[in-house]
Amino acid sequence: MPHNVQAIQIDAFGGPEVMRLVELEVGDPGPGEIRIRHHAIGLNFIDIYQRSGLYRNALPMVLGMEGAGIVEAVGEGVSHLRAGDRAAYACMPPGAYSQARVMPATSVVRLPDAIGFDEGAAMMLKGLTAQYLLKRTLPQGGLQRGDAVLFHAAAGGVGLIACQWARALGLELIATAGSDAKCQLALDHGAAHAINYRSEDFVARVKQITGGAGVKVVYDSVGKDTFEGSLDVLRPFGLLASYGNASGKVPPLDIGVLAAKGSLYLTRPTLFTHIATRDATQAMADDLFAVVESGAVKIRTEQRYPLSEVARAHRELEARKTTGSSVLIPA
């Protein structure tokens, strides 16, 4: 039966002030859909991009790409979930900033009993991102144990998962972060080296660490501020995976630069291409759940905000005052 829920909606693009707490009606799921009641909601930079209008969606819209909770009802044709299942997801379309929602079932997976709702909401988008980066976004010849990789913003939610996962894979992960404390956090989570990009030249330090050889791959969610330097630390045939824009969009590029710097590869991947089918989503989630349940990767949920305080959460995330993952808790 339809019922009202609280949700965070925007009617215009802009700063945190455009987010409003509203009541919306949630109905029954249609074919291929489920209704899920959220116990925790993930907070991600993509939410800021969508709120600001960098990534534009039709308005009005409810923000949020990630959540965990209990399946309340399933629509016709949904066979992998049942009412009462613990579940989690990261997917399009947005709508997670709500007490409950109806959504496509394709990208929703059952959450293992050993993983809590806070962890589930904090790990899906960020953990699946780390999975597709380290396992599917690879340089020519792939990655072998002992290979050096550079990971920007390594003290954030994706970064801390990647530090641990890279260690489990035997990779030499070089981390960058914006403070000595964040650098130490990355080291504590498995980074082999950490560079404070506010006080050190990360290009020079990477060259020093690698004996001038550079790295096989750079994973860069920062964007404009680190793009050129990221190209400069790659060895010949190296790969730059630019998967975010935290400092702003990368300006247009003359692709001849890639030839001049060593026949480099450049990709702009997104999680949502990787999880476009249920089978792909399930396989990636199984890999993520396995590495978390093994203890090799631990999900750090450092900040918890009531859903009603989402504006504060966005301000702190934008100011880079957060570490690890953050979740919103619906009333």
Image (tube, rainbow, N blue to C red):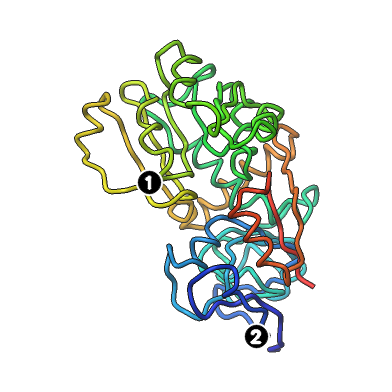
Q: Nearer the viewer, residue 139 or 77?
A: 139
The spot of residue 312 in percent (x, y) is 68, 63
Element marked by disc 1: loop
Mark 2 crowd level (few <14, some 14–19, many ≥20, 10 Å Cα): some
Residue most extreme to the left: 256
Please state which of residues 266 and 226 is positioned toward the viewer in this rendering. 226
The residue to which callout 1 is attached is 268
Residue at 66% x, 62% y: name it.
67
Residue type beneath disc 2: Leu
Q: Residue at x 49, y 29 (%)?
A: 150
Residues 151 and 77: in front is 151
Does any portion of residue 5 appear in the rendered image?
yes
* Element type at mark 2: strand
Residue at 70% x, 61% y is 68
Q: Quadrant of residue 72?
A: bottom right
Q: Earlier in the sequence, mark 1 or mark 2?
A: 2
Quarter containing the N terminus: bottom right
- Give residue 95's quadrant in the image: bottom right
User: Do we see residue 70 in this rendering?
Assistant: no
Q: Amino acid at mark 1?
A: Arg
Kindly identify the residue that appears in the image at 55 percent across and 73 percent down.
32
Picture coordinates of residue 203 (x, y %)? 43, 25
Residue 173 vs 110, above or below: the answer is above
Circles 1 and 2: CB atoms closer than 8 Å: no
Residue 217 percent coordinates (x, y) = 43, 29
Q: Is residue 168 left or right of residue 217?
A: right
Q: Which residue is mark 2?
A: 24
Please identify the residue farthest to the top as the structure is shown: 211
Q: CA distance from mark 1 to mark 2?
A: 35 Å
Q: Quadrant of the C terminus?
A: bottom right
Residue, far front: 199
